[in-house]
Amino acid sequence: AQKITQTQPGMFVQEKEAVTLDCTYDTSDQSYGLFWYKQPSSGEMIFLIYQGSYDEQNATEGRYSLNFQKARKSANLVISASQLGDSAMYFCAMREANAGGTSYGKLTFGQGTILTVHP
Amino acid sequence: DGGITQSPKYLFRKEGQNVTLSCEQNLNHDAMYWYRQDPGQGLRLIYYSQIVNDFQKGDIAEGYSVSREKKESFPLTVTSAQKNPTAFYLCASGEDRGRSGELFFGEGSRLTVL
């Protein structure tokens, strides 16, 4: 069974500094996708970044980058130049391939990390 | 605009009553999902459907039921058998194939049992 672990219940960062949110995963599959979502206090889930298990380069999307270390089964999110609007809950998630590897299955989430950005 | 619409946004229910949460998508996605979120917690999968007229139980399906009669719609019924139904419910949809398996989420429905 797939499992996602986020060991940091809460993180604090000063505005304009970088912060790393940790995520480790456990799977026996070779084909899977890793995701990060942001959840502001309003409750909506905002997709941030995706990393495929076969992607050789780390994914980047603007100020977000994913530090993917496949051998260590870690997929940490790095937010550069933090902004006050980055204060939110952040979730790491994984989607394994279905049997046959031709399609994706369900998305499994970690417990989340609450990020607070101080001015 | 394409997206996922959940209704109602807020719902109050008396103990012993069934309630149905609506989820509609116009993204032409095959797969749809229902998640439950408790305060300060992650999302737990209730039910999911990867094709019309078919659905599978997730990790916490007891006390819930779903139907998938149309591609666009995946309503969730919270039955009186659900022992602790007060929670935030999120519906999502996504492609099952291709480059990314990103899920798109609705804005959620907050259910409170009085």
Image (spheres, rainbow, N blue to C red):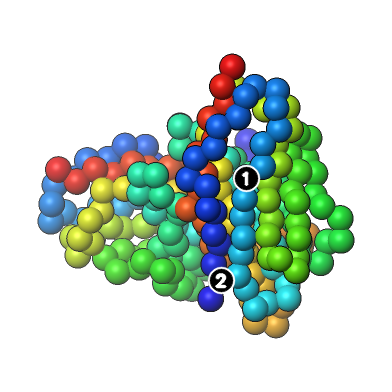
- State the SS at label 1: strand
- The outermost residue toward the right is A56
- Residue A81 spot, x, y in % from top left: 73, 27
What residue is disc 2 on?
A2
> Looking at this view, is A86 or B103 the one in front?
A86
Rounded to the nearest whole Å, what is the CA distance between mark 2 and mark 1?
20 Å
Total numbered circles:
2
Residue A13 sits in quarter: top right
Q: Quadrant of the N terminus of chain B?
A: top right
* Viewer-nearest of discs 2 and 1: 1
Locate residue B55 relative to residue A56 in the image: left or right.
Answer: left
Residue A97 sits in quarter: bottom right
Q: Which mark is residue A21?
A: 1
Residue at 68 percent across and 46 percent down: it is A77
> Looking at this view, is A37 or A28 the one in front?
A28
Q: Quadrant of the C terminus of chain B?
A: top left
Locate residue B85 relative to residue A115 in the image: left or right.
Answer: left
- Residue A56 spot, x, y in % from top left: 87, 61
**Figure check: A59 above or below A42:** below
